[in-house]
Image (tube, coloured by chain):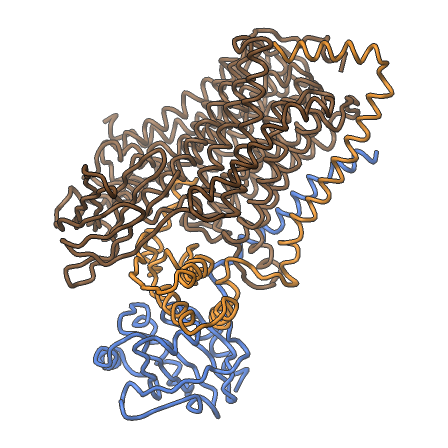
Chain colours: A blue, B brown, C orange
Amino acid sequence: MKRRLILLVPLLGFLVLSIFLYRGLSLDPAQRDSALLARDFPAFEASTLEDPERRVDRSLLEGQVTLVNVWGEWCPTCKQEMPQLLDLAERGIRLVGIDYKDTREQGLEFLEEFGNPFEVNIFDPEGELGFELGVYGAPETFLVDRDGIIRYHHTGYITPQDVREVILPEVQKWQ
Amino acid sequence: MLIQMIPEIGHFALILALLMALVQALMPLAGAATRRPLWMAYARPMAAGQFGFVLLAFLCLSASYLLDDFSVANVANNSNSLLPWYYKVSAVWGNHEGSMLLWILMLAGWSFAVACFSRDLPEAMLARVLGIMGLISIGFLAFILITSNPFERLLPNVPGDGADLNPLLQDFGLIIHPPTLYMGYVGFSVVFAFAIAALLGGRLDAAWTRWARPWTNIAWAFLTVGIALGSWWAYYELGWGGWWFWDPVENASLLPWLAGTALIHSLAVTEKRGAFKSWTVLLAISTFSLSLLGTFLVRSGVLTSVHAFANDPSRGFFILMLLGVTVGLSLLVFALRAPRVSHAVGFNWLSRDALLLINNILLIIMTVTVLLGTVYPLLLDALGMGKISVGPPYFNALFVPLTVVLCLFMGLGPVSRWKRMATGELWRRLALAGLAALVIGILAPLLYGGEWNLWVSLGLVSALWLVLPILRDLYDKSRKTGLRRLSLAYWGMVLGHLGVAVTIVGVAVVSNYSVERNVRLAPGDSVQVAGYEFAMTDLQARRGPNFLADTATFEVRREGATRSFTMAPEKRLYLARGMPMTQVALRPGLFRDLYVAMGEDLEDGSWAIRIQYKPFVRWLWLGGLLMAAGGVLAVADRRYRRRRATAPAGKEALA
Amino acid sequence: MAVMRFLALGLALLLGGGLAWAGAIETREFDDPVLEQRYHSLTASLRCPLCQNQAIDDSDAPVSADMRERVYRLLLDGRADIEILNHMTERFGDYVLYNPRLEGRTYLLWGLPVALLGVGGLLVVLVVRARRNASAQRLSAAERERLDALINRERSQ
């Protein structure tokens, strides 16, 4: 009898593995949390896209809940995302852009063409700030609370559904 | 008219094949359970019929490709009218649906082969084996028909031309690599079916192993060659000289290979000594289960792999169900029916039995390690413990020492005897070989590389430790009995172990003595790498059939030599997909490869060029071929060709 | 399955994954061969966060180029390997480490193979002991001799 039980071990092992594999089917291996969650927005000093003379730093993001959106003129998805960002801005949410790996000229052209939901845009031509944020592709969006701490991170395209079901509730939560 | 219906004929053939598989599975199994010869007699013709219809379906899909029938979605997505005809054929298995069809064709082919070549099997045994293979066929035929129909039409909007085959797949290696690999994966279904049949029929004797061994070794040989081909292809096609990446897909092929290697050794013990029966059966089940698991991992998208398919959750779910039912049921049968009492076969510390036991345990630990590393990110993710990666550093850190330990015992294997042997005898036979392995292995890096290198020494000592005792054994045998009297099985073992040694030498040397230089070169420049002078003489743009290319020409000369040769790497842009590709220039040799790849145009007339010197890289794959040859040779032995259904009872009784 | 492996590539390109092979040939100069060695081993053990499953040293993704550049700069800066790895995980998460750290959640990953080795060793000892006794009890000296003769004959065939 004891021997029979030992013979059941492979079956049990397989069943446990199967449960994990089943769970795995509904997980997205590409979906990852940012390493910066619950941490301070990284310190930086940069000029703005709109005005090369104006220098901004971390303090720009303190005092108010802000959505920081990383975009670039070269990024097709960023264009598709603009209507949702404009919608969010209309709802009174503060948006700050990071023009990532772009030229000033192209960045300004982009805003001209697709609208500008951003209060201000941080100009990041070399992607230095993007690197500090762990950005690996645009668009990416960070929610920063009034203390300048990153509270939520969205990778890739924000759909209208995401706006309703994810972004707005998150903003409310940290308001 | 008939030509336009080819896809429908193929689809219909698949449905008929499914029906035949149903009969092939149910009638013989029921017949074997109720002892009705008539029902059992369904097995052979149904296996043949199923194979015939799957083959017809496969030919129909191939015809659709060759005829550029872009109304078939599969053809439109993976072919193009400009594609050469041989790539149109290989494009059939260059996608999920078509490769699944190839998988099924191989499965039906193996069933058919069993039906043809097992005339000496007892009727009930054959009925069970083919019945079980029929059950597997049912699962996969249902899978392809329900979730992955390769004959789906794009009507009425037929595209004018196809999207083309991925340029990476337009290559000779990719014509032969998948069929070989699949022959291996699917081939293990035979020994799996034999194992289940033995459990159901309660017959697990030496005759059983004698039937199962040839099928196992041949499947294993295919898998070995398939893996070697994949590695070779990655080496020359991906453009940076890597040959093993520990990617989940590679691991998926390594898992059944490791378990299969354990199995062919364990089968030897079971045949010769009647020992480890339950264990052998469990290994047979595990090996095929790991093949299926690999299919799931690759096609379900649960793991992030370079090679994963475009995924569809319903497919993943279906394969998981298939996997669960097949593996779960077979392990249940195992738990319920595995032999109650094993023969208490006696053996001593120093015996081939004990060494093979150690071999099996080590191979299983390696299998578990690879499996663990492969699925661990998934396990953590499923438990909500974050995302981590497990990559080459992890696998190398564990796999290399395990291999060295394995070699330590493996060297003793061929010279050992069953049951027990005297310490003095072993010492006498191995002392010299061991000493020689140590001295040569430790000194060789000093002489070759100029400084001592632990890893190279470990590799060389291991490899020599595999080879030298065999040479000593051959020498002894040649004096005692003469080499002619040695069996093919013995030569198979010698060749297989030699193959392992050759691969280990390749791994050790190429991993430690490769030279890589990334340089900026323009025509007229030259650079010295590893004793060769590479002079870039020309840079040309040219147009190929479906790509644009920049071709650099190098005159390469060994230092001090007068003769030079030409190497011409290319950077291609494939037009249909707008995909850049690097066409490597290779100068292969038994002891070193020269490898030149073009990187980026640096815009000032010069290019970033990667030049590599890869010593002994060919040994990696040469070893694989030797191993496979050994596996085949071992079962070409006389005793597997004897047409006898009964086991020689004498040996069993004695053991 | 291993073949169609590379099919995803087309898809990845569509998604802007930037998964191109064989690129990433950079003509970086090192004065110190040790530094060069460290550079290669670091870039081989960091995973590209954007790609499917590639180290940053063989991926063409822009973020991989940035990461390589950062590794290079930190090396020239005299940082230790562990500092450089931490620098990356602080920004991109533990995901980028191909060599997972030994910590609570990876004890099983690192420990199981070692534990299995112990269990395996124990198993060998137990099995051989049992088998040795089995043979000793069951065969007389004469029987054993006869058996050995038979086995040897079988072997030499």
On the picture, is B645 further left or further right than C27?
right
- Quadrant holding the C terminus of chain B: top right
Can you see residue B247? no
In the image, residue B597 lies at what x, y percent?
27, 49
Q: Please give the count of numbered marks on the rendered protein.
A: 0
The image quarter containing residue B71 is top left
**Of B180 and B273, the residue lying toward us:** B273
In the image, residue B464 lies at what x, y percent?
53, 32
The image quarter containing residue A10 is top right
**Vertical arrangement, residue C43 with respect to residue C77, above or below:** above
- Quadrant holding the N terminus of chain B: top left
**Vertical arrangement, residue B499 with respect to residue B509, above or below:** above
Residue name at image x 74 percent, y 35 percent: C124
Can you see residue B510? yes
Instruction: Specify the farthest residue to the top.
Output: B643
**Vertical arrangement, residue B488 with respect to residue B153, above or below:** above
**Of B347 and B543, the residue lying toward us:** B347
In the image, residue B57 lies at what x, y percent?
37, 28
On the picture, is A82 further left or further right than C125?
left
**Of B115 and A135, the residue lying toward us:** A135
On the picture, is B141 further left or further right than B368?
left
In the image, residue B279 lies at what x, y percent?
69, 30
On the picture, is B607 further left or further right than C145?
left
**Vertical arrangement, residue B152 with respect to residue A173, above or below:** above
